[in-house]
């Protein structure tokens, strides 16, 4: 039996997308810190993701600098950890003399254990509120007159403002006298007479008998009892020096019986080590940060902020919010930091600081930061502006969570693929590169060094598809993985380029609440059957790293890119126009492309011209932004004729909800090739055959990768590749024989229908169909035939 090989030439194509890439975050921060007004500052800076696995930027992160009021982060954090969030401040009243008939013949002594709430930051407009409450209780207990003095013991601080300095413990008697005078005035205001004076005393054990005990939680702030975590809100929001200093002294007194900054510090530092803060080099002279001799590093500060935000959620409520309240209530307005930055400020003549986190509103993740700038006579305004600008960078749209894959390309030697990824200039110890046969299940990682940004995998075989993702590794662990890109091994150049332009997925929290990277390009790669393909990020096309003109076909994936994400930038429009004019073939798919480029108002003239002349469609009405259906069917006698009706994802089928599929209107010699079924109806895809000049075009108004049926994706993709004439020729492979049966094998393209024909006489002009026709499911297909003929000749044809 002889097998005669017949060839049938097929073709396939794909096309890609473009957008200018911004500078890396570290580059942009360096440019900001190089501004003349701040270039001579000394810094300690650290920016990390929430887990600490990615270090986005650092400058002297472990070097101690003057933190100013960032010291309050350490004071309040330690108080939460050592005393507990429900801790309250106690004030006791003693009667030192005979009490009869409402008359106290003797002194009324008050001793306060650092109650830090006696100010207008806590009780707006009435610093005396707590003292008045105490007086009300004394009056309710029958007190009508004090024939003697009113005295304050312990630590009484009354009506000191946020910027006041109460550091001098040696003058505590003076402070107590001020509080005693306020207490006397409160007594008189409620009709209790006082014949004596008001005096400040020292010590913690006033003479007399305990008459009444007041707790700070007897009163409220913001409707909540004034326990420690609630009282810390005004402390941190307005950066209240006196409150913070009192709190550090209170820690020392409650835990060691000693009222001093040193006693408080000696409890704070050991506690810090228990929560992972390396205390080496810390200098803590007070609780407020008023001392310019304090020293903390960005690493120490950020580590503590991260710990507190997880371990003590109520601590987060103490942080000022950008453009909302506190000391940053007028900062970050009109930026991505508005309402999303939660951070503690610091300000001295030698220091400006800001430490906390920003919740990126596009990816819903927290990014932690600590900035401390020092300089004698520091330019405070310019330094604040520089810090704010840096913080806004990490709250912007499209903040990278991981390295960006640039490309996966066929080397052309039949055994190798090259993988390249970007240098985001994050601080790292290395990279991990993962490979996969299907883009879903990945092998153990290949460990690569911190300066490696490309890798060639060898030992592959022609026709083999491989998919890759990469992550960055730092001292804190491993980042989120990159997107998944793939390529097919070939002994020559790849004929199809897949261009990933779908950036919206990373920041579209409706469909992608985890803001994870995507594998949509890998789905498309799996549906390319036959010709070798490469995959690139659209930025690689913009930068010229990958040239569209090297490929006869480009598949451009735009997902749901729209106005916020920009479907085609001006640079991309220029490149795609040049590609099509040179005869290149483009398969473009995505929703909202028409809305971005051709809606009634907003697009430029260049946008509209590109959409009309190159993408060969236009927006007929505003309603065409949404086909209002998820079902499509091919046009009879079009390039997809014979394919089954199908549907695309409504958000329940594994990719994402295609909320606004474009209804396309043909123009410039395009014709409809797929129609929407139901909804508004109309064209779901248009094609242009190149007859009027330029390359061919297939334009889907919905994302190709969201077609829910894999076999349907195979069929539609193979039809596109055949239309573009880039499918490899059919080649009949060596047959296999068993008795009178033969297995005929040939190269194929998944989704394409093939017809096997035979004849026993080579000189005969008639070929006999071997039915039924076979729809390929892979890159090779086969049929079994039984024959008793001495010789049979076969050929394989494409069924149109």
Image (cartoon, rainbow, N blue to C red):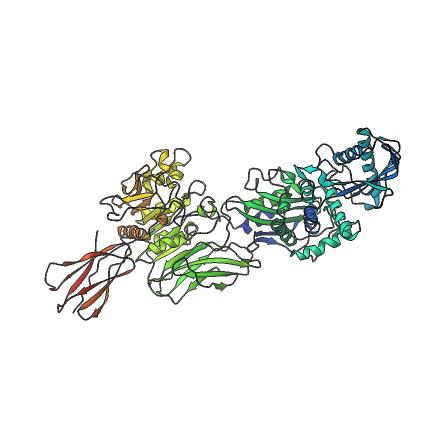
Query: Which quadrant of the view contains residue 469?
Result: bottom left
Q: Is residue 386 visible?
A: no
Residue 457 is situated, as x and y percent measured from the top left of the image, at 42, 64
Position of 526 relative to 681 (above/below) = below
Front residue (pair 259, 587): 259
Front residue (pair 497, 523): 523
Query: Which quadrant of the view contains residue 774?
Result: bottom left
Query: Number of numbered discs present?
Result: 0
Residue 241 is situated, as x and y percent measured from the top left of the image, at 73, 43
In the image, farthest residue toward the front: 101
Q: Residue at x 50, y 50 (%)?
A: 400
Q: Is 51 placed left or right of 676 in the picture?
A: right
Residue 421 is situated, as x and y percent measured from the top left of the image, at 46, 56
Q: Residue at x 79, y 29 (%)?
A: 190
In the image, farthest residue toward the bottom: 739
Position of 238 relative to 292 (above/below) = above
Residue 263 is situated, as x and y percent measured from the top left of the image, at 77, 52
Q: Residue at x 13, y 59 (%)?
A: 767
Position of 167 relative to 458 (above/below) = above
Position of 62 relative to 628 (above/below) = below
- For the N terminus, which image quadrant? bottom left
Q: Is 678 placed left or right of 285 in the picture?
A: left
Q: Is 506 placed left or right of 615 in the picture?
A: right
Front residue (pair 171, 28): 171
């Amino acid at each position: 039996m002889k097998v005669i090989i017949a060839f049938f030439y097929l073709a396939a194509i794909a096309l890609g997308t473009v957008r200018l890439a911004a500078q890396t975050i570290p580059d942009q921060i360096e440019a900001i810190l190089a501004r003349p007004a701040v270039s001579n500052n000394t810094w300690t800076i650290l920016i990390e993701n929430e887990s600490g696995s990615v270090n986005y930027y650092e400058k002297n992160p472990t070097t101690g600098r003057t933190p100013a009021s960032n010291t309050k982060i350490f004071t309040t954090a330690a108080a939460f950890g050592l005393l507990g969030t429900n801790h309250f401040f106690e004030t006791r009243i003693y009667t030192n003399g005979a009490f009869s008939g409402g008359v106290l013949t003797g002194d009324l002594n008050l001793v306060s254990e650092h109650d830090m709430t006696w100010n207008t930051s806590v009780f707006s407009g009435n610093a005396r509120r707590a003292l008045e409450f105490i007086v009300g209780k004394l009056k309710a207990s029958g007190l009508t007159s004090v024939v003697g003095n009113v005295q304050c013991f312990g630590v009484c601080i009354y009506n000191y403002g946020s910027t006041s300095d109460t550091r001098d413990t040696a003058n505590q008697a003076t402070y107590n006298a001020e509080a005693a005078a306020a207490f006397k005035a409160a007594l008189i205001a409620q009709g209790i007479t006082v014949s004596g004076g008001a005096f400040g005393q020292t010590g913690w054990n006033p003479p007399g008998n305990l008459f009444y005990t007041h707790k700070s939680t007897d009163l409220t702030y913001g409707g909540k009892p004034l326990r420690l975590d609630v009282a810390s809100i005004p402390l941190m929001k307005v950066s209240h020096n006196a409150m913070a200093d009192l709190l550090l002294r209170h820690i020392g007194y409650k835990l060691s019986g000693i009222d001093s900054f040193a006693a408080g510090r000696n409890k704070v530092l050991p506690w810090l080590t228990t929560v992972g803060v390396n205390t080496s080099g810390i200098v803590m002279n007070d609780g407020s940060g008023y001392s310019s001799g304090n020293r903390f590093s960005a690493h120490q500060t950020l580590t503590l902020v991260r710990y507190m935000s997880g371990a003590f959620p109520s601590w987060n409520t103490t942080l000022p919010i950008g453009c909302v309240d506190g000391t940053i209530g007028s900062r970050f307005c009109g930026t991505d930091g508005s309402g999303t930055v939660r951070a503690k400020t610091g300000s001295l003549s030698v220091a400006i600081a800001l430490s906390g986190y920003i919740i990126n509103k596009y990816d819903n993740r927290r990014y932690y930061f600590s900035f401390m700038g020092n300089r004698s006579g520091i330019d405070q305004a310019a330094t604040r502006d520089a810090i704010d600008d840096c913080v806004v960078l990490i709250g912007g749209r499209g903040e990278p969570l991981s390295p960006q894959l640039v490309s996966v390309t066929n080397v052309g030697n039949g055994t190798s693929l090259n993988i390249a990824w970007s240098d985001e200039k994050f601080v790292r110890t290395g990279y991990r590169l993962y490979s996969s046969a299907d883009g879903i299940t990945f092998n153990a990682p290949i460990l690569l060094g911190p300066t490696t940004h490309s890798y060639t995998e060898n030992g592959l075989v022609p026709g083999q598809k491989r998919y890759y993702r990469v992550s960055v590794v730092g001292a804190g662990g491993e980042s989120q993985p990159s997107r998944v890109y793939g390529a097919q091994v070939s002994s020559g150049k790849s004929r199809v380029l897949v261009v990933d332009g779908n950036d919206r997925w990373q920041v579209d929290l409706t469909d992608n609440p985890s803001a994870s990277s995507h594998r949509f390009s890998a789905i498309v790669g799996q549906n390319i059957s036959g010709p070798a393909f490469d995959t690139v990020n659209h930025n690689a096309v913009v930068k010229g790293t990958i040239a569209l003109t090297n490929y006869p076909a480009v598949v451009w994936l735009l997902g749901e890119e729209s106005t916020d994400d920009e479907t085609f930038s001006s640079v991309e429009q220029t490149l795609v126009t040049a590609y099509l004019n040179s005869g290149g073939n483009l398969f473009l798919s995505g929703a909202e492309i028409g809305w971005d480029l051709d809606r009634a108002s907003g697009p430029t003239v260049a946008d509209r011209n590109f959409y009309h002349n190159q993408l060969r469609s236009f927006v007929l009405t505003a309603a065409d932004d949404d086909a209002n259906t998820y079902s499509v069917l091919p046009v009879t006698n079009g390039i997809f004729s014979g394919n089954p009706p199908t549907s695309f994802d409504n958000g329940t089928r594994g990719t994402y909800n295609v909320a606004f599929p474009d209804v396309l209107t043909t123009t410039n010699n395009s014709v409809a090739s797929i129609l929407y079924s139901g909804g508004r109806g109309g064209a779901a895809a248009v094609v242009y055959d190149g007859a009027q000049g330029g390359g061919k075009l297939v334009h889907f108004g919905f994302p190709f990768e969201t077609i829910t049926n894999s076999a349907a994706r195979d069929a539609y993709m193979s039809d596109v590749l055949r239309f573009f004439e880039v499918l490899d020729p059919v080649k009949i492979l060596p047959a296999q024989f068993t008795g009178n049966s033969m297995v005929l094998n040939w190269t194929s393209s998944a989704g394409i229908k093939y017809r096997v024909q035979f004849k026993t006489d080579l000189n005969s002009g008639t070929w006999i169909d071997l039915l039924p026709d076979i729809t390929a499911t892979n890159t090779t297909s086969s049929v079994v035939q039984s024959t008793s003929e001495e010789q049979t000749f076969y050929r394989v044809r494409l069924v149109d």
